[in-house]
């Protein structure tokens, strides 16, 4: 835990009282795996009130901050639903609610202009309440604007694939409307709509300039996948015209939203805003379910009044890590602006592996069908040996003791998946020869080898709902264990134990605009030889159709191993196969959205490691974000609505 030697501001807690309160708050935050700095933030604001109200103000503020960390944009005063460690430390909630009427808290809580805003039964930070209002107002203005008359040519609707009626309606709506929401499950052809739309825009009487079209996604991985899918679609046109060739060569390259908006880490804001709007006539954002409330606010503020906005995503997936469930609420509140894609091409009977996965996702998504998870067409039960390579969705229950069983599984996993069945010696032979980078860039053969290694790790992943958990149930423990196995396999060639080895997958932990790297970007550690210098380990990442790499020594503090990832981090990614490690059934992280999102990350094979009880618990527990955006979009009085995000 963090250092508790903090001096209390005069007038709030006495030194001993503050030490005890801070220690208790830090323990709560530690139990919830949250940043201990939240308690310091709560204390700074609590110091604004008279001493007799300071204690209650502190716990109310900490409660709001914890609620925001869990993804809510407001607290329901009648039913706050605090996590157990916080509720126990806080004490009787009724007395806290009564304290909100204390005149001494007027400097902290009010109807407006205060750090905390109270609206009837709801309490929210001024920051998020303002974001909700700004998003709702911007969306209402944009959706209320008149559209244009435009009809896409038939040739763009039938190649490279023939679009179904829903997809055609989506293309037409984007051409004619300032705001379009497109939601559909994986395999429903969202990228095909983007390809058709880009082609249609070049065939209008007044073609849209390619540099006025912006493509974006919340994470680097999602942006990379978006670009790859568009290139694949354009390459699939059998008889491309000159416009298609130009689009393939000079078309817009997808970027992260933060990079698109010009994120400034020093000030925590964006270069593009209302005073300096994006130079765009059309902005298309993929994986929109991952967009938090404040990021959506920044995007809407940066759009020119006459620019068109398209948000594509799956409203049934996990909402963003940041507060809010913006895309889900937009879809629910704006049916006229929404196109729902229902036809899944992965459900094709000719693709039995993908069809079985999407069928289980449907069973999870629809409460009326959860019993079918264990039916004839449901999840298959068996051993690791029976499930291996079969495809579809299998559940394997760990044997007791679980920690030993998991260690055996992970040993097998790294040999079969990471090392491709070759063993550590053959794997090292693939990753240790340095990539050569000269005056003309990457050597062609080395570029192809690095891209093949990146594609190798894109083929599989270990997923888990939580970062920390007992008995190798959490991402941190899984990555630590797999790194230890890799170290053991290379011990004969190492004089010391480095944090990262050649050939290990990594992910970026935070935005680094100076390098063009953003939270969630995924790469691999490889030796790189620049010119005639000695090779050194670098972190190598895909960038468009090429690579970028950075010396490991300069970047390693911002990296983590990516053998395993949280389900949240995996959003925007797609793997051929994955294993989902399930915590015990009572764990609150097990939700319908977590299970649905994990299932829909895989194209051919999903291995669930856990119990049937954990699967049932996940399918019965839904993520409910407490948010007021939906009511504001519908012009409903938010003060007394007992509503969570849909």
Image (cartoon, helix red, strand yellow):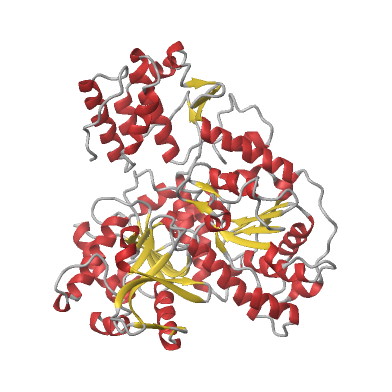
- State how many labels appear: 0
Position above or below: 441 against 42: below
Position above or below: 555 against 291: below
Residue 246 in view (yes/no): yes
Q: Split into 4 quadrants, where in the image is the C terminus?
A: top right
Depth order, front residue of 290/462? 290
Residue 294 position within the rendered picture, expressed as x and y whole percent measured from the top left? 54, 43
- Tell me which corner region of the image, top left, top right, bottom left or bottom right, holds residue 390: bottom left
User: Which residue shows up at 39% across the image and 30% down it?
Assistant: 63
User: Which residue shows up at 75% across the image and 64% down it?
Assistant: 168
Residue 262 position within the rendered picture, expressed as x and y whole percent measured from the top left? 55, 55
Residue 92 in view (yes/no): no
Q: Split into 4 quadrants, where in the image is the N terminus?
A: top left
Q: Is residue 247 left or right of residue 472?
A: right
Q: Is residue 364 left or right of residue 1?
A: right
Position above or below: 338 against 458: above
Residue 644 position within the rendered picture, expressed as x and y whole percent measured from the top left? 54, 36
């Amino acid at each position: 835990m963090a250092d508790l030697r903090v001096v209390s501001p005069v007038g709030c807690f006495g030194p001993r009282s503050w030490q005890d309160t801070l220690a208790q708050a830090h323990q709560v935050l530690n139990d919830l795996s949250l940043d201990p700095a939240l308690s310091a933030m709560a204390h700074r604001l609590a110091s604004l009130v008279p001493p007799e109200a300071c204690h209650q103000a502190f716990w109310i503020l900490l409660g709001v901050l914890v609620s925001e960390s869990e993804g809510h944009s407001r607290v329901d005063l009648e039913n706050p639903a605090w996590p157990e460690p916080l509720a126990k430390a806080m004490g009787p909630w009724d007395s806290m609610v009564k304290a909100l009427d204390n005149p001494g808290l007027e400097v902290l809580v009010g109807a407006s202009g205060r750090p905390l805003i109270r609206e009837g039964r709801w309490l929210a930070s001024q920051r998020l309440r303002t974001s909700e209002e700004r998003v709702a107002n911007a969306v209402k203005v944009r959706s209320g604007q008149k559209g244009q008359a435009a009809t896409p040519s038939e040739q763009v609707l039938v190649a490279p694939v023939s679009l179904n009626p829903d997809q055609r309606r989506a293309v037409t709506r984007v051409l004619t409307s300032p705001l379009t929401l497109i939601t559909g499950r994986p395999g429903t052809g969202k990228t095909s709509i983007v390809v058709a739309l880009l082609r249609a825009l070049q065939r209008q009487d007044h073609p849209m300039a390619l540099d006025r079209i912006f493509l974006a996604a919340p994470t680097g991985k999602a942006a990379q996948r978006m670009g790859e899918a568009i290139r694949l679609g354009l390459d699939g046109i059998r008889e491309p015209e000159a416009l298609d060739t130009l689009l393939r060569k000079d078309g817009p390259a997808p970027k992260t939203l933060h990079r698109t908006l010009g994120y400034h880490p020093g000030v925590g804001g964006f270069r593009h805003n209302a005073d300096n709007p994006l130079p765009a006539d059309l902005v298309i954002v993929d994986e929109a379910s991952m967009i938090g409330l404040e990021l959506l606010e920044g995007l809407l503020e940066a759009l020119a009044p006459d620019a068109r906005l398209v948000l594509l995503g799956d409203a049934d997936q996990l909402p963003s890590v940041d507060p809010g469930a913006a895309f889900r609420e937009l879809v629910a509140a704006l049916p006229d602006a929404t196109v729902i894609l229902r036809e899944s091409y992965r459900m094709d009977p000719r693709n039995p592996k993908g069809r079985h996965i999407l069928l289980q996702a449907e069973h999870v998504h629809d409460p009326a069908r959860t019993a079918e998870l264990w039916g004839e067409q449901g999840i298959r039960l068996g051993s690791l040996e029976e499930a291996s390579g079969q495809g579809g969705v299998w559940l394997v229950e760990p044997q007791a003791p679980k920690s030993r069983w998991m260690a055996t599984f992970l040993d097998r996993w790294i040999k079969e998946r990471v090392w491709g069945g070759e063993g550590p010696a053959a794997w090292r032979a693939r990753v240790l020869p340095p990539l050569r980078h000269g005056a003309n860039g990457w050597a062609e053969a080395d570029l192809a080898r690095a891209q093949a290694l990146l594609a190798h790790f894109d083929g599989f992943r270990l997923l888990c709902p939580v970062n920390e958990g007992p008995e190798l149930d959490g991402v941190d423990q899984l990555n630590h264990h797999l790194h230890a196995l890799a170290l053991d396999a290379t011990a004969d060639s190492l004089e010391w134990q480095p944090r990262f080895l050649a050939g290990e997958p990594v992910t970026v932990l935070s935005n680094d605009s100076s390098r063009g790297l953003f939270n969630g970007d995924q790469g691999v550690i490889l030796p790189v030889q620049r010119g005639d210098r000695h090779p050194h380990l670098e972190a190598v990442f895909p960038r468009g159709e090429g690579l970028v790499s950075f010396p490991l020594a300069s970047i390693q503090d911002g990296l983590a191993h990516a053998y395993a990832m949280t389900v949240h981090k995996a959003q925007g990614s797609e793997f051929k196969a994955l294993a989902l490690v399930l915590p015990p059934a009572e764990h609150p992280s097990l939700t319908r959205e977590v299970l649905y999102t994990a299932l829909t990350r895989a194209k051919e094979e999903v291995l669930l490691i856990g119990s049937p009880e954990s699967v049932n618990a996940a399918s019965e527990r839904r993520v409910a974000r407490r948010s007021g955006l939906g009511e504001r979009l519908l012009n409903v009085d938010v003060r007394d609505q007992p509503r969570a995000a849909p």
